[in-house]
Image (cartoon, grey):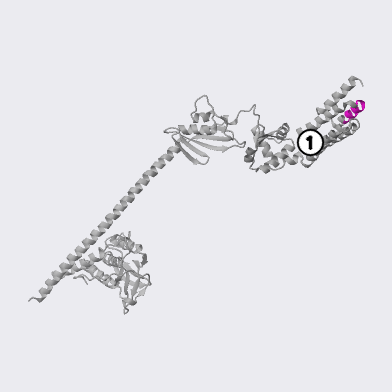
Amino acid sequence: MSCTDRKTFETTLDRIGRGDATPAEAAMAIRTALAAEPSLVERVYDALRDVTWRTLTSRSFGDELPNWFDVIRHAAALTGGKTGGGVAAKMLAFADLISQSARFAELQPLEEVLNRKHTKALLTALAGAGKSITNIALMSILGLRESNLSRVTGALQGTGLIERTSSGKEASFTLTDRGRQVAKKLNIDIKDPGTEREWWHEAPFPIAVWEADGRPVGANAAFYRLTRAQEPHALQAFDDWKISLAKAALEHRMASTDTWRLQIDDVMWIQFVETVMPDGRLCLLGSDVSVTMKAMSDVEAALKIAQEAEARARREFADTENCLVAYQSANSHIRNEIMTVAARSNERVRDVRHAWVASAEHVVPPALLAVEKDLGAMQVAVRDLMVPVHFVTHHGKPVSGWLDPRQIVAEAMSTAKDLYPSTQATASFGSVPKVRGVVDTMRAVLSHVVILGTRHGAYDFHGALKGSNLVTTVRVKTPDVNPHLDPFQAVTTSGLGYCRAIVETNGGAFQETVSGSDTMFVFSLPVEEANPPGRAVGRAVRFGAPGKATKPRKPTSGSHR
């Protein structure tokens, strides 16, 4: 064989190794070359080795793989008797690799891999980054565990769309040329790091970006203006940058786990929000929150003023309450003094009247009788109307005792007629037995209802014991003095509103009803025990927990009956 023919065979074999020949062309050329020049076995081996390597590394598992399998097995058969089987065995190994690749392509076709879950999302992340992304970042972006991510990346590696590189225990992935072609067919935007400018430079907001390990990537001009960075602008490592900024700040506040605020000067506050981007980088978004912080400061100042005002009001209330206690003590003292003077005066009048009756004339002047009557009425009124009833606060358990509602109402009615001679009011408490309850409260309510009610149109008082309550019904007619007021307004302005407060504060009830042209007010006071007529006190009917009884007070001499 001439040198020209050998050179032609070598060129044809080189063309096969470069991948420029079809399987049919390669089979014809190899068969012809080995038949004409057996010494070309090594060149045939090199060509088929290159075909196998190119197929495996490029992942170009097309429909021609079975044909290449046949070509390589045929070449091994032709070279078996010429080289003693060594080269042929290597060629058969190439054939096994091609066969395995064909089976992989058959079991995992590209369309089926692309339709798997997370495949397109991973391709989109790699194409958008324009560079390699670590497996840790991909797990964060796709929300996958390491085992699931390995299945996705393994399938894409098998189809030749991505390639894997390792650095220690950390793996990174990037798109291959074939992966870029497939991404374009899927209308996935591919970023070219060499021609595209980083996106944050176009953003109108202050933004800075660091790698996941804290290495600086870059920041836009708005970020440097916000942080008042000096030129030339250079972004520090993330931890160093935070320390430098914190040292220059007047105050630091954490709004949340990923949001923090710094006071730069007396007026300016800036806020930063941290977030992890899809490519695993750390992004920091800055903003000027001076107006918001000024509003918060104003609210805090107003709240402080309100709290101080509340504390001051509480102190004033306590002082007022102390004054009320002092007033009630003084009022009780004055009441006792008035009752003592009235009783003493009444006693003297009675002594004068008895002496006058025993004299020769045996006639008591009417004026003296009127004075005695007025003094008695004043004594009853002072005793019952000026009683200190604590219905705001109790500094101890209210004192319970026995009292006769019929007697209290009779005395109050007699006093009312003495004070207001023109009154025609009547009272009906005949069936009400003695009861046990809070003495001061019940006496004050019954006396106020009768004495003050008769002055403002109350003309009928009816009492009854209903269950465990002493119920007093008051009938009021339209007032003559203030005809523009309805009966309830008239009675309330007369002081019976005080009775209502006492009743409701001590567990009682108040009700207003209309009966014809009259208005009826019903006061209901709870009692602890009742003693029906003819029954001993010790065998009284109990309604609730017994109260601590007090010794009955001796009637003051000269009390009006």
Bin the neighbour count of mark 1 within 10 Å (Cα to Cα): few under 14, some 14-19, many 20 and up: many
Tell which of 66 and 408 is nearer to you.
66
> How would you classify the magenta stretch by its main secondary structure?
helix
Left or right placement of residue 545 versus residue 125 in this view: left
Residue 14 in percent (x, y) is at 83, 25
**Height in image: 70 above or below 325?**
above
Residue 397 in percent (x, y) is at 33, 64
Q: Is residue 212 magenta?
A: no
Left or right placement of residue 374 versus residue 169 in this view: left
Q: How many marks?
A: 1
- Amino acid under label 1? Phe
Residue 95 in percent (x, y) is at 83, 36
Asked which quadrant contains residue 38, the reply is top right
Tell which of 441 and 7 is nearer to you.
7
Q: Is residue 31 magenta?
A: yes
In magenta, the rendered stretch is: 27-37
**Height in image: 321 above or below 292?**
below
| Residue at numbered disc 1 | 61
Residue 82 in percent (x, y) is at 90, 30
Tell which of 555 and 214 is nearer to you.
214
Q: Where is the N terminus found, in terms of image quarters? A: top right
Identify the residue at image location x=81%, y=38%. 102
Q: Is residue 20 visible?
A: no
Q: Where is the C terminus found, in terms of image quarters? A: bottom left
Tell which of 202 and 465 is nearer to you.
202
